[in-house]
Image (cartoon, rainbow, N blue to C red):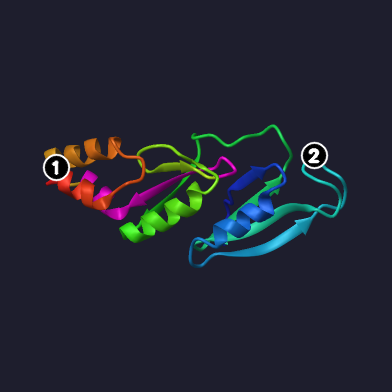
Amino acid sequence: MQRIVPCLWYDGAAEVAAEFYVSLLPDSRIERVMKSPSDTPGGPAGSALTVEFTLDGRRYLGLNGGPGVNFNHAVSFQILCDTQAEVDRLWTALADGGTEVQCGWIQDRWGLSWQIVPTRLMELLNDPDRDRARRAQEAMHGMVKIDIAAIEAAAA
């Protein structure tokens, strides 16, 4: 059993956000939607209060807590990708209504920060040849969405 479950605060959009997130990754699903028994700052009685969902095998809780609490870059979710096609697919989906940042970071339409990171980038950054690793990192710093071929070319 997963004992620590991240709770994500939304202003009425927890259910639609969870539905979107589970559509992106395998082994993902909505587990349960708890309806509020009374009016709350997050919505009227009968609306979704919490949404339990699984993303890539890990549990999360979406809470419709109401307005005034926003996500920031201090917490983000990193998705490791094996191919450029996977980077591109996830980037396109999360950018729809969101904000592209830099170095593989993106904020989705609810303001939650994601890092779309090719596993190849991590391999290059950990290369024992530190000059090769530095060139890969410097190339990444000039990117918004990470381009694996460009990172590899820079490292070489």
Residue 58 is situated, as x and y percent measured from the top left of the image, at 53, 59
Name which quarter of the figure residue 48 lies in.
Answer: bottom right
What range of the chain is rendered magenta?
Answer: 109-125
Q: Farthest top residue?
A: 68
Q: Quadrant of the N terminus?
A: bottom right
Q: Which mark is residue 88?
A: none
Mark 1 surroundings: few (<14), some (14-19) or many (≥20) residues within 10 A: some
Which residue is labeled 1 in the image? 132
Q: Amino acid at mark 1?
A: Arg
Q: Amino acid at mark 2?
A: Pro
Q: Within 10 Å of the Cα at label 2, are there few (<14), some (14-19), or many (20+) other Cα atoms?
A: few
In terms of image quadrants, where is residue 133? Answer: top left
Q: Is residue 72 above or below residue 56?
A: above
Residue nearer the viewer, 34 or 22: 22
Location of residue 31 in the rendering, given as x and y in whole percent from the top left corner: 65, 64
* Residue topped by disc 2: 41
How far across and how far down the image is residue 51, in percent?
Answer: 68, 56
Residue at 26%, 53% in the rendered image:
120
Q: Please tell me whether mark 1 sits on a helix, a strand or a loop.
A: helix
Query: Is residue 65 shown left or right of residue 140?
Result: right
For label 2, the SS is loop
